[in-house]
Image: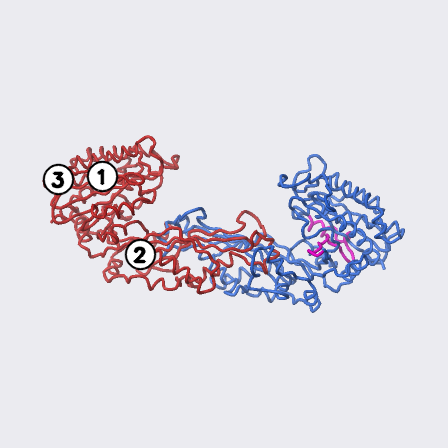
Chain colours: A red, B blue
Amino acid sequence: MDVRERVNANKDTLLEELTEFLRMPSISAEPDDSGEFRACAEWVKNKLEEAGARAKILETEGHPVVYAEIGSGDKTLLSYGHYDVQPPDPLELWNSDPFEPTIKDGHLFARGVADDKGDVMARIQALRFFIEEHGELPFKLKFFIEGEEEVGSPNLAPFARRNAELLAADACLWEGSMRDETGRPEICCGTKGMAYVELRTKGPSHDLHSMFGGIAPNPVWRLIQALRTIKNESGEITLDSLHELADEPSEKDLEAIKNIPFDESSLKRSWGVESFDRNLSGEEALREYLLRPTANIAGIQSGYTGPGSKTIVPSEAFVKMDFRLVSGQSPEPVVELIRDHLDKRGFTDVEVIDLHGVEAAKTPVDSPIVETAVAAWRDVGRNEATVYPTIGGSGPTSLIATELGIPTVMTGSVANMNSRIHSPNESIKLDDYFETVAYFTRLFERFGK
Amino acid sequence: MDVRERVNANKDTLLEELTEFLRMPSISAEPDDSGEFRACAEWVKNKLEEAGARAKILETEGHPVVYAEIGSGDKTLLSYGHYDVQPPDPLELWNSDPFEPTIKDGHLFARGVADDKGDVMARIQALRFFIEEHGELPFKLKFFIEGEEEVGSPNLAPFARRNAELLAADACLWEGSMRDETGRPEICCGTKGMAYVELRTKGPSHDLHSMFGGIAPNPVWRLIQALRTIKNESGEITLDSLHELADEPSEKDLEAIKNIPFDESSLKRSWGVESFDRNLSGEEALREYLLRPTANIAGIQSGYTGPGSKTIVPSEAFVKMDFRLVSGQSPEPVVELIRDHLDKRGFTDVEVIDLHGVEAAKTPVDSPIVETAVAAWRDVGRNEATVYPTIGGSGPTSLIATELGIPTVMTGSVANMNSRIHSPNESIKLDDYFETVAYFTRLFERFGK
């Protein structure tokens, strides 16, 4: 019997087990006073054991990791996911209890269903179907399921470094990606890095009456003078040497970009804008979005911002900026670039505060695991999975992809563009879940060949 | 007997009457439920009548004006002041009750003593001394004492326009100026105008994940692109035609600037800065401060400004700016300039909101009333009063100086640089008060000649 048929024959059980998982309020942002959080980790461990794996709880400085292994052979596949969820607030915006999974019109509503419990469970169920059919796994499959992804994975780096051998693999399936508006699955081969900085300027030691505006140093104007050296009048980034650091995108990356269906007008409509920045469009916009660094301003503040007309020369000003980085641009050297760039232009007074850094990660689009991921979608009847050379966002993938050198992809699409991840009424389509269970079974078959 | 001697012989009475005035909590920002505010207006009217003037209360849409006339002759002098005071908050920072005048080390502490009750009372007492000595006033003296200065004089413009004939005069003494750090009296011949605007930009209809930072239009960058056309890299104002509108300062103004004692290092020290904007210094700094327009940023705000590293493309941004204007630059045409300047450069999307406008006002430094004001200081032994062609701040002086065409000066220095106007522990030096009573008596003598 084909796996699709077997999945269809087991829909009730699949749904029942997923529902049980979703009922557990594993909110990592809250302390685990009741022990419910750890109970969820134990539950995941048990499910892995039921599927035949040797599972264990590994302690960290924070919430525990669930780790499991099964199978043997020349090759090893690592699966990363997380069993923790975002807080459900604001509760009043939910149409049903976030921890009482509810089905409506073929959609399953619950906190964590799209991020990342559906995905975690689909992989465990796929393993079961595989074992049921084939008896044993002809490669080693490792599950690495953490409990702190939704609070920024504070203990992931030390854990991964300490357990490099345990996590060693030929390829890694990062947490799943999404489906686009047309239902087409996405496969993503990298994440951007990030340097998050605050630039601060000082004027007078206290707010002054703006009668002195002609001679008092104004910290906002000073900040603007500094910022105007970071982007030119056309909006192009002019930060010294930033582009020199970037690895050139491969021919394959550029080809992959061409194959991405990019519904510009629908994206613009959803943002309520008439055009993209700098009037970018088509492939050029996609290259900018996915393959180039950004110099985004996330916030700026100074002086009086209430109603009416208070007249002061403010005392200080700051801007918050995230530079999304591509392969080759590490956050620390980029922060140094910013410092040097400003110093060289006389802005030694502008303070640069390094708030947060993430490394970019990149797996070649023609890696075997990418080909396997695409082919497995074909196996379940999806001939049109889209390969993204990278995504616009960032994440800790470099710990696996770069530090441990394991080709890493995001694949398996339980979630869709309307899944409201991190928001009230998080949901998935039930059919997407069942299809993804079948998908991972096929992927295991292909990986084992 | 010389007026100085007569003032000295009457110190107790002078102080007693000033104290009575200061006890009345005439806070214009609060409603006058108890009638105390109106009682203060009546008290001022009575004092004017005691001095021999024909006084009356004139109603406005808000708090009433006290108006009085005395004397006759070819010339008319108008005296403007206000009997209302700022709220005393924060009360806990006062060392004594703000409405229980307290003397300490030769200083008199009370709300309103420096702004503007001491000044109002000094002029009324000067009139009394003059009448005592000379029997009658050989010119017409008009008192125009309003009750809403501390809330922005909302009814002053309609009142002045409606009563142009009543207020007609050859010269006007605006509310008094100050003494500088060395005790030297200041005479100010003008105020800057102001155009207060908010510039607003829009990005996406809601904050976006900054993974889209490479292609989503960012309203802060857009605002910065607009602002960089308003000042160049050197910090000079480059707003189209702004400077063309300005009247050239006269030779006399430039001469007056040369005579202003300007203690740069003490000013920088009090601001906690190492240098003025654009490294201005000396006469050049004074010209910038007093004779040229400004393009000050009073506040700016967009996006996330809390702790840590939230990653968004904000939905909107705004900046609050006050352009202090010099003679020739009216606020409305300046707002139009800003609009045209932005439109011409493609920033038609940047919204310009006109929040508040004030006209500049300028009386020539060689006007007879300025000469009289300087000479009267010499009469009381102050040979070094400083003439400021204008001040850096703004006020409604143009209603009198420009609309009614009456040469207007600020003179009579009850207050000093440490008087803490609008702040807790407002104070004056008692000797300055007594000297100012004598000063105004001398000024009336000179004006009547």
Q: Is any atom of residue B60 visible in this view?
A: no
Does B174 lie within the magenta span? yes
Q: Which residue is mark 3?
A: A131
Q: Which residue is mark 1?
A: A121
Which class describes the residues within 10 Å of circle 3: few (<14), some (14-19), or many (20+)?
A: some
Residue B378 image offset from top left, x and y in percent: 79, 60
| Residue type marked 3 | Ile
Cα–Cα span, label 1 and label 2: 30 Å
Cα–Cα span, label 1 and label 3: 15 Å
Is residue A426 found left or right of B52 in the rendered image? left
Label 1 resides on the chain identified as A
Which class describes the residues within 10 Å of circle 1: few (<14), some (14-19), or many (20+)?
A: many
Is residue B324 found left or right of B415 in the rendered image? left
Give the residues in magenta. Answer: B155-182
Do pointers 3 and 2 mark residues of a single chain?
Answer: yes
Residue A24 image offset from top left, x and y in percent: 29, 33
Q: Is any atom of residue B300 visible in this view?
A: yes
Along the line of sight, the residue nearer the viewer: A271 or B327: B327
| Residue type marked 2 | Leu
Residue B38 image offset from top left, x and y in percent: 73, 39
Asked whether the beta carbons under mark 3 and mark 2 sit within 8 Å of each other, the answer is no
Give the quarter of the image for residue B74: bottom right
Q: Which residue is mark 2?
A: A290
Label 3 resides on the chain identified as A
Asked whether the beta carbons under mark 1 and mark 3 sit within 8 Å of each other, the answer is no
| Residue type marked 1 | Met
Does B90 lie within the magenta span? no
Q: Is residue A181 above or below residue B447?
A: above
